[in-house]
Amino acid sequence: MAITNPFQFLQQVRAEVSKVTWPTRKEVMVTSLMVFAMAILTAIFFFFVDWMIRTGLQFVLNFFGG
């Protein structure tokens, strides 16, 4: 692998960065809000799943435990 000097490296980096399609501010906001919304929905879902498992386990332990 050939070693390039720092100046050539920076030129190549600039060329590659110019090819990137950057999202607009609106796209970033919408996708960020969707990520937060999905995280909240997932947390609520797992809260209820955990609650149902805990309730069921307590019922079983109380039924057989005495």
Image (cartoon, grey):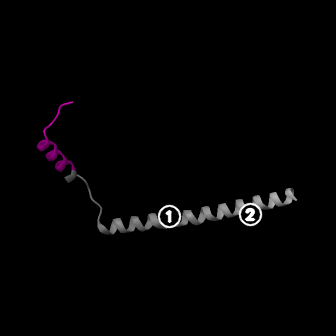
- Say which mark, if any, is on residue 38: 1
Residue 32: x and y, percent? Answer: 40, 65
Residue 25: x and y, percent? Answer: 30, 68
Residue 64: x and y, percent? Answer: 86, 56
- Say which mark, if any, is on residue 47: none
Residue sitting farthest toward the right: 66
What residue range appears in magenta? 1-16
State the SS at label 2: helix
Instruction: Please report whichever mark, 2 or 1, sits nearer to the chain's N-terminal start.
Output: 1
- The residue pinned by badge 2 equals 55
In the rendered image, the quadrant that contains the N terminus is: top left
Residue type at tag 2: Thr
Label 2 to label 1: alpha-carbon separation: 26 Å
Main SS class of the magenta portion in the image: helix
Left or right of 31 in this view: 47: right
Label 1 crowd (10 A; few <14 / some 14-19 / many >=20): few
The quadrant in which residue 22 appears is bottom left
